[in-house]
Amino acid sequence: MLHFTVDNLGVDTVHRASFCHELPNGFPFWVYVQANTPMLLNMAGSETYLVEAGTCVLYPPDCPRYVYCPKGQEYTSNNWIHFSCSDDEALKEILRQYRIPIQQFFTLRQFMPVTAILQELIYERNTEQMRKDIMCSLLIEQMLLQISRNILPLDKKTDSSAMAHLHTFELLRKQLYATPEREWSVKDMAGQVYLGANQFINLYRCFFSVTPKQDLIHARIAKAKTLLSSRVGPNEAAITLRDVALLCGFKNEYYFSSAFKKVTGIPPGQYVPRRDI
């Protein structure tokens, strides 16, 4: 079992315009950096890149790196962590399985899960709680899992243009999950983000690892679970499967039952909601 140790970390660290971080020999730690503003980065003596806000990179130990604040920019900000691992070679294999690139730029669909873990790590390091070293190790594992789950699989040619659409896609998806009963169509959704249907489908799959139609079904099933849960209890009025189907946007209870079983593995009539104890 791998054990991780935190050397140092920061969230929303601000560097002024004169910031210049030159490390020809790197650090003896793994370094994860998440840019919150544009930054100038140079790795291992290669050319210097102006990376956009949201760009991430994971450096291995002893990797040369150079970080600067872009000219004309008042400051730059980033989240970062330096950590060590009990077995670097085993970690590299895990990173390969997780598809987390080493010493290459990437971005994430959602940044908050990783940022929240970094904030929790800061809290843990400043407490006197029992076994906080074990907790910090587990949090770094969780951070790597969240990075793996949220990596955005876009190539360099499409990265910048695609990222410009990410926010509008996230807003559209919130609408989809808030009102899954609407008669959503790919044409209508694509129109809301001012894209053609094919480009919309491709970007939606890149951002969320699911097609718009599949996501709509998941949203409707999620609402169905809520409605099915509401009929549980002796004092609540019964709700039929036909009612649930129509309230969730399905044409009939037969299509609803088929979709529900395909997603959950059980028919809706057998669904029992989880109860917190």
Image (tube, rainbow, N blue to C red):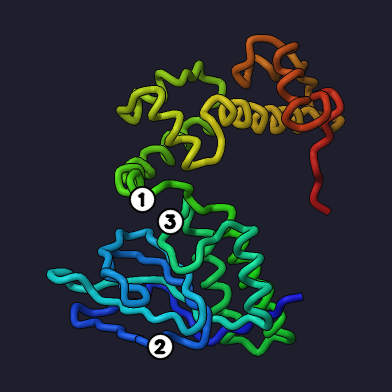
Q: Amino acid at mark 3?
A: Thr
* Residue pointed to by mark 2: 25
Report whether 225 appears left or right of 59.
right
Residue 209 in the image: state x and y as whole percent: 55, 40
Spatial CA distance of label 1 from label 2 is 27 Å
* Residue under the point 58% across and 59% down: 146
Kindly identify the amino acid type of the residue bearing the numbered disc 2.
Answer: Asn
> Label 1, label 3: how many angstroms apart (C-alpha)?
11 Å
Residue at the spot 69% in from the left edge and 27% down from the top edge = 224
Q: Which mark is residue 156?
A: 1
Tag 1 secondary structure: helix
In this figure, which residue is indicated by the disc labeled 3? 107
Q: Relative to 116, say whether 202 is above or below.
A: above
Residues 81 and 31: in front is 31
Q: For this view, does 26 lie left or right of residue 142?
A: left
Q: Secondary structure at mark 3?
A: loop
Q: Position of residue 15 (x, y in %)?
A: 28, 79
Between 237 and 13, which is closer to the camera in this rendering? 13
Query: Which residue does the image show at 42% across and 85% down from the upper left?
Result: 26
Instruction: Please report whichever mark, 1 or 2, sits nearer to the chain's N-terminal start.
Output: 2
Specify the quadrant of the image occupied by residue 133: bottom right
Side of 251 where 159 appears, left or right: left
Residue 16 x, y percent position in the rendering: 23, 79
Q: Residue at x 69, y 86 (%)?
A: 129
Marks 2 and 1: in contact by CB < 8 Å?
A: no
Q: Is residue 102 left or right of residue 199?
A: right
Q: Quadrant of residue 127?
A: bottom right
